[in-house]
Image (cartoon, helix red, strand yellow):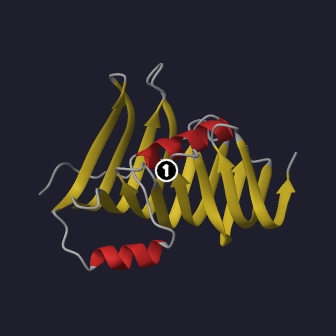
Amino acid sequence: MKLGSLRKPRSIPLRGVAGLLGVVALALLLASCGPQPDETLNAASAQEPDAHFADLTRQEYRSGKLSMRIQAREASWYEDEQRLEISGLSFINYNTEDGTIAATGEADTAIFHETSGDAEFSGFVHVVSADGDVSFETTQITYKRALDVFEASDGTEVLIKAKNQLMMAGNGLLFDVKQKYYEIRSGVNGSVYQ
């Protein structure tokens, strides 16, 4: 079933770390995920999906205003688990106050659990703030809606760039969207440019 055409959005920046993570949080609000992405995806792949989509476009609204648009090369829906598995994800997060773009992002694969609002992104994961101030890249990140927290495991490398002045890399990431706090958990190294 073809629902739309997939166009890869340009990397459009977002406003600061909070906005960047807020965008990712909104994208993750669409979903939930298990603790081991590969195991979850492999277990899920053994089941037949209830629906399969190609070139999917999905828009989310909050208080009647567009808050997010996701596009997927392919998506599979599993009704019993209320799970949406996506390949070739790209998203745009919008500021619901004025309709401007807050952030953009992409991931090779994503698993969204509609019931909990949790999500897991894997493969190449890249998120950019609307103004280009902040971006991060990793290979796996999980969003926990109840805590409004993004996490990458301690063994996962994360790269954060801020305003072409700061570049940090390390292993593991904790980002608390509400507190606007983030940390790389170990092996931190970086450069500051002036």
Q: Position of residue 178 (x, y in %)?
A: 64, 37
- Please determine whether, in this image, residue 80 is positioned above or below residue 104: below
**Crowding near the residue tagged with mark 1, few <14, some 14–19, many ≥20 C-alpha atoms within 10 Å:** many
Q: For the C terminus, which image quadrant? A: top right
Q: Give the secondary structure at mark 1.
A: strand
Q: Measuring 85% from the left and 50% from the top, which residue is drawn there? A: 193
Q: Is residue 31 above or below residue 59?
A: below
Can residue 98 be seen at all in this image of the molecule?
Answer: yes
Residue type, numbered disc 1: Gly
Residue visible at 50% across and 73% down?
36
| 27 vs 159, nearest the viewer | 27
- Return the x and y of residue 65 as percentages of the image width and height: 36, 24
According to the picture, the residue beneath numbered tag 1 turns out to be 105
The picture quadrant where one finds residue 42 is bottom left
Name which quarter of the figure residue 52 lies in: bottom left
Residue 157: % across, % down: 67, 69
Q: Nearer the viewer, residue 114 or 72?
A: 114
Taking the image as shown, residue 3 lies to the left or right of residue 115, namely: left
Q: Is residue 115 left or right of residue 74?
A: right
| Residue farthest to the top, as pictured | 98
Name the residue located 62 percent from the left edge and 63 percent from the top edge. 152
Is residue 11 in sight in this rendering?
no
Picture coordinates of residue 100, whole percent (x, y) = 47, 26
Q: Going 70% across and 39% down the picture, which residue do you hit? A: 180
Instruction: Please state the total of marks drawn on the protein image.
Output: 1
